Amino acid sequence: MRLVNTRYVQEGSVLARPVINSSGRVLLQSGVRVTASYINRLILMGYDVLFIQDDRLEDVEFHLAITSQTREVAYKTIKNVSSYIESGLEGSLVVANVRSSVQHMINDLLFSTDILGNLSEIQGYDDYTYHHSVNTTIIALILGIASGYSEQKLIELGMGVLMHDIGKIKIPERILNKKTPLTEEEFGEIKRHTINGFDILRKNNDFSLLSAHIAFQHQEKWNGAGYPRGLKGSEIHEYGRLAAVADVYEALTSKRVYRKAMETNDAYEYIISQGNIHFEPRILEVFKKNISVYPTGSGIVLSNNQRGNVVKQNRAFPNRPFVRVFYENEQPLQIPIDYNLADYPSLMIIAVDNR
Ligand SMILES: [Fe+2]
């Protein structure tokens, strides 16, 4: 199984993973042979990459960070909360459902703590907000688990991150999905989602006030350059500091109607470069060690001009996975070579190439 940029997928290739939309509906089953018209439709729907069967990579295992079922429950929870709020029932947010959804996520993550899973199945354009909230929660929980958080703290963190963008519900779609630069007034409106979210969440007595602060503070930056209050350093609660890292990483690696997704390695580099600027250095140390940089199956080019795919994550060295190479200087090798990049310090991944 390997990741192939949809534009390079050949007619007749066999899907190794199902194509699923964000409500969990299967659009194409794994095992389906794709036709030119499927490929074109998937491109239009925003599916940039597909998992394709490849005999040379039959042994590659695919692990999802959380099960499809847990993800579906999380989506439903956010949808329910959103529709409650839209109908003006702000005080009756279904806190118990949010808590139980987060508990499922924590259990899934703890269960697979020895491997770094892919964050999710591949994604198209639809329902960005749900997708973003769930993936940001996964990343935040991974960072929380790696920081040694108690179960209580993980639940507080997860509940706040799952609801961190709930204030966006009041922002018109035309501003959220605007393809041209925002006016100052529109940006002001976007900024208010933090305050709105905090106000919605704190009206619920069962919702921890610390969790609600994640909605309030996730756009604050370590150096004080964020919003809404321009807090800096330890003025920002640790949940807010942690959520900020997860939020930006997820947003960069997701595609939006108005821009392409950044490759995960470029987003990783960007996040690391913001240590002591936008983000707390201590959290970045945890991030570096616990977030996989190259999704399993992705195509990579090595510094020795060999090209192949990631076959397994390396728990101890997320940016140095196990790879299998098939080409050297673009000529096919007679026998593929497997590397555990952790054992080859001089060998670097220099590019992602999902052909
Ligand atoms: Fe946000």
Image (tube, grey):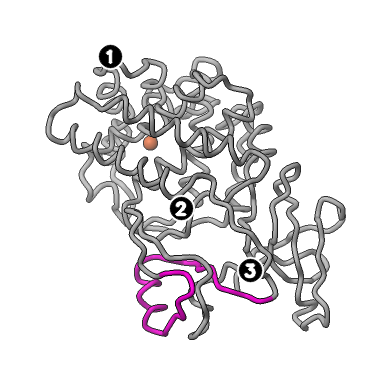
Look at the image and say whether residue 54 sits in the magenta stretch: yes
* Residue type (three-letter) at the residue carrying disc 1: Asn
Which of the four quarters of the rendered structure image does ligand 1 lie in?
top left
Q: In the image, which residues are magenta? A: 29-55
For image coordinates 32% across by 30% down, the residue present is: 97
Q: Position of residue 131 (x, y in %)?
A: 39, 48
Residue 45 located left or right of residue 90: right
Dot 1 alpha-carbon crowd within 10 angstroms: few under 14, some 14 to 19, many 20 or more: few
Residue at the disc numbered 3: 353
Query: Is 41 drawn above or below residue 282 in the view shown?
Result: below
Q: Amino acid at mark 2?
A: Ser
Q: Between residues 210 and 107, which one lies in front from this camera angle?
A: 107
Q: Position of residue 314 (x, y in %)?
A: 73, 49
Of marks 3 and 1, the one in the foreground: 1
Q: Which mark is residue 205?
A: 1
Q: Is residue 57 magenta?
A: no
Disc 3 from disc 1: Cα separation: 50 Å
Frontmost residue, 314 versus 233: 314
Q: Residue at x 43, y 56 (%)?
A: 255
Q: Residues within 10 Å of mark 2 (few under 14, many from 20)?
A: many
Q: Observer-nearest residue: 67 or 311?
A: 67
Residue farthest to the left? Answer: 87
Mark 3 residue crowding within 10 angstroms, few (<14) / some (14–19) / many (20+): some
Q: Is residue 196 above or below residue 307?
A: above
Residue at image position (43%, 59%) is 123
Residue at (62% x, 63% y) in the render: 298
- State the image quarter where residue 200 is shown: top left
Quarter of the rendering containing residue 41 = bottom left
Element marked by disc 3: loop
In the image, 327 versus 150, the foreground residue is: 150
Question: Which residue in the protein does label 2 denote?
Answer: 254
